[in-house]
Image (spheres, helix red, strand yellow):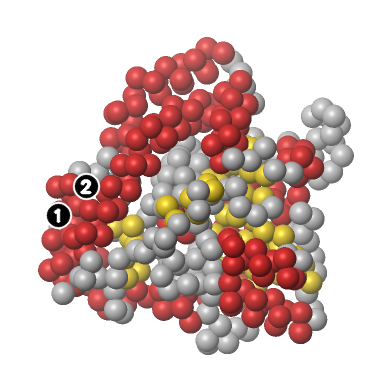
Amino acid sequence: MQFRDLKKQYEVLKKDIDQAMIDVAASSAYIMGKPVKELEAALAEYVGVKHCVSCGNGTDALTIALKVLGVGAGDAVFVPDFTFFASAEVISLEGAHPVFVDVEEESFNICAADLEAKVQQTIAQGQYTPKAVIAVDLFGLPANYPAVKKVAERYGLKIIEDGAQGFGGTLNGKRACGFGDIGTTSFFPAKPLGCYGDGGAIFTDSDEYAALADSFRVHGKGSFKYDNVRIGVNSRLDTLQAAILQVKFRAFCDYELDAVNKAAAMYTERLSGVVDTPVVPKGYYSSWAQYTIKLKDKESRDALQSALKEAGIPSMVYYPTPMHKQTAHAPYGPYADDLCPVATSLCNRVLSLPIHPYITEEDVEMVCSIVSKVAL
């Protein structure tokens, strides 16, 4: 059994993907070729924004977003304590100060109440200026952007949406990556929409932000690539990856997103009352980057993971360590033991099960039988 079955996906899409790769090889337009612009236009339309600017990976997308907003030394950027390291790493790379915010127990996403408390605390301390919040759409579910936006407007914060896991999810009919001032996503192979390497994208309705993102991704170019008007990065989406994404994006829209939601529904039906299953609140739609259950404690979680492994079933712990306890973030402390209690607790209790658009009902049954035997 595969955790995210990219081999099966390739078997289904092989004819079109192979042809797309051959076409790029024959074109010799390997960097910023026609498929890149076509993909950007299609993704912008899908998300519902004016601009999509592709780049080399999801981390670069966040980095470019921070550069566009002018984040730097002396600025505080607020980020969930329960997320992948890149969401916070990019803040430090820009010389800014990461402030870790607790998350909601049910959604795994940033807690607006704790965000406001951390903003007020930062203002009271007077060392850093609150500048932006990076809200993460964890495991496929958009964050509570109406609540986050209220806090952001109250304190003059810009909102960056980290939609690396959220692409395809919706909130009240609006698609992920279209919230806030700038949205970002990742095309890492295991993401809801993934390529065959690294890739990412930035989304915005702002003409100014889009122009700046386009400049930053190509060494800070001005009117052409040898007119450098700012310090930028080298972060372009390869034409080959764009061509592959075009094929996979059609499948994503046509049936994959629906199929992964059906798989999640099968899990929830079988595991409700056995373990804490993921919650999709009213008005939300998840793209299910992960199907993450919660156990009562670390011992129970580890025992279940071991039992699954013995049965040949892969599972993952996303994430075992909260951001404020990562070694790299020690210089920004010291941190109180109760800084983010929900995030700290989740790190000990979560376990992600195999899920993808091509998983069979038999595989789901096999996983659930092991979970039910061990967890009850």
Q: Nearer the viewer, residue 124 or 270?
A: 270
Q: Which label's residue is closer to the chain start, 2 or 1?
A: 2
Residue 14 x/y as whole percent: 34, 24
Residue at 42% over, 60% down: 282
Tell me the amino acid under the disc marked 2. Answer: Met
Where is residue 267 shown, x and y percent of the image? 24, 57
Measuring 23% from the left and 66% from the top, which residue is drawn there? Answer: 272
Disc 2 marks which residue? 1
Spatial separation of the CA atoms under disc 2 and disc 1? 10 Å
Residue 135 figure quarter:
bottom right
Residue at the (38%, 52%) spot, across then down: 288
Mark 1 burial class by Cα count in 10 Å: few <14, some 14-19, many 20+ = some
Q: In this rendering, is residue 123 above or below 205?
A: below
Q: Which residue is mark 1?
A: 366
Judge left or right: residue 56 versus residue 373. Answer: right
Is residue 121 among what the camera can see?
A: yes
Residue 142, compared with residue 30, is above or below; it is below
Amino acid at pointer 1: Met
Marks 2,1: beta carbons within 8 A: yes
Please determine whether, in this image, residue 69 is positioned above or below residue 210: below
What number of labels is visible?
A: 2
Residue at left offset 35%, top offset 19%: 15
Q: Is residue 90 left or right of residue 170?
A: right
